[in-house]
Image (cartoon, rainbow, N blue to C red):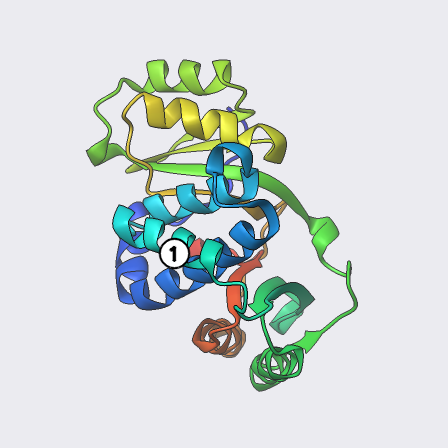
């Protein structure tokens, strides 16, 4: 078990997810629409859709809502054309930030992202300026309170299914995979009947940076809050060591 990715404690994640559930469902709804448009409505033959459904289930999106979204996307040939755009930049003290967006209006999204960076004393860089500091990994988070399986048995099952790493924290387990084997590992965990608090492919920092100046912390938090307020922003990754804040 190598160095973990400093995922926040499960209670903090739950509180954050509950507060933002409306936005999370909107984000996932768009991702379902794009995945269906690109690869069809059958998750068995559409890896991207299967991955979005896993993310939806981990976010406690009701099954009927997922199914309605798939049917609507499959039958709606006039739906908006969304595209994925990634922005990279720096926050205070050089904190690396990656912003993934899904938008039907590039100008609006670019303006929102630039404003967020600017108001938090950060700046957008060129594509690739910070992504080399992150590794793309499949990440599955499991709440210990909801897991009846023995930790060693869960670890062996995950590794047998193709996982690269297994980490244990006070209140949760983390399974890391190569993006190509993520779906195989996710299915294996699901078949064990183990509930997943999170399950998706993410950008995980190779190293973390602490901020000692309260002004820098406030500025970075402003960037993150403003990005979170944008409906076009799907996910934000950074290498700030929040545990040292």
Give above or below for 139 relative to 38: above
Local secondary structure at mark 1? helix
Q: Position of residue 112 (x, y in %)?
A: 57, 82
Left or right of 115? Residue 15 is left
Q: Position of residue 239 (x, y in %)?
A: 58, 56
Q: Position of residue 82 (x, y in %)?
A: 59, 67
Give above or below for 108 relative to 191: below
Seen at 70% across and 74% down, the residue is 124
Q: Which residue is the site of mark 1?
A: 69
* Among the 4 quarters of the image, the one containing residue 170: top left
* Among the 4 quarters of the image, the one containing residue 130: bottom right
Left or right of 18? Residue 31 is right
Of the pair 235 and 151, the residue shown nearer to us: 235
- Count of residue discs: 1
Is the C terminus in the top left, top right, bottom left or bottom right quadrant?
Answer: bottom left
Seen at 58% across and 71% down, the residue is 103
Give above or below for 226 relative to 64: below
- One can see residue 106 in this view: yes
Q: Position of residue 158 (x, y in %)?
A: 44, 20
Of the pair 148 and 191, the residue shown nearer to us: 191
Would you call the spot at circle 1 few (<14 residues within 10 Å), some (14-19), or many (20 or more)? some
- One can see residue 96 in this view: no
Seen at 55% across and 47% down, the residue is 202
* Among the 4 quarters of the image, the one containing residue 243: bottom left
Of the pair 151 and 160, the residue shown nearer to us: 160
């Amino acid at each position: 078990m190598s160095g973990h990715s400093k995922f926040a404690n499960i209670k903090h994640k739950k509180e954050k997810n509950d507060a933002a559930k409306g936005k999370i469902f909107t984000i996932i709804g768009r991702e379902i629409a794009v995945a269906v448009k690109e690869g069809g409505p059958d998750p068995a033959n559409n890896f991207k859709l299967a991955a979005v459904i896993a993310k939806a289930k981990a976010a406690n999106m009701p099954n009927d809502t997922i199914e309605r979204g798939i049917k609507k996307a499959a039958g709606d040939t006039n739906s908006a054309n969304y595209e994925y755009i990634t922005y990279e930049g720096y926050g205070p003290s050089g904190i690396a930030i990656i912003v993934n967006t899904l938008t039907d209006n590039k100008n609006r999204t670019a303006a929102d992202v630039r404003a967020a960076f600017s108001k938090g004393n950060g700046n957008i860089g060129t594509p690739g300026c910070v992504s080399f500091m992150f590794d793309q990994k499949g990440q599955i988070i499991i709440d210990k309170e909801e897991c009846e399986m023995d930790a060693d048995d869960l670890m062996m099952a995950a590794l047998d299914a193709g996982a690269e790493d297994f980490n244990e924290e006070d209140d949760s387990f983390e399974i890391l995979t190569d993006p190509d084997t993520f779906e195989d590992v996710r299915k294996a965990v699901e078949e064990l009947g183990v509930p997943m608090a999170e399950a998706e492919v993410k950008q995980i920092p190779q190293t973390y940076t602490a901020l000692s100046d309260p002004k820098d912390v406030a500025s970075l938090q402003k960037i993150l809050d403003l990005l979170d307020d944008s409906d076009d922003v799907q996910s934000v990754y950074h290498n700030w060591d929040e545990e040292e804040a």
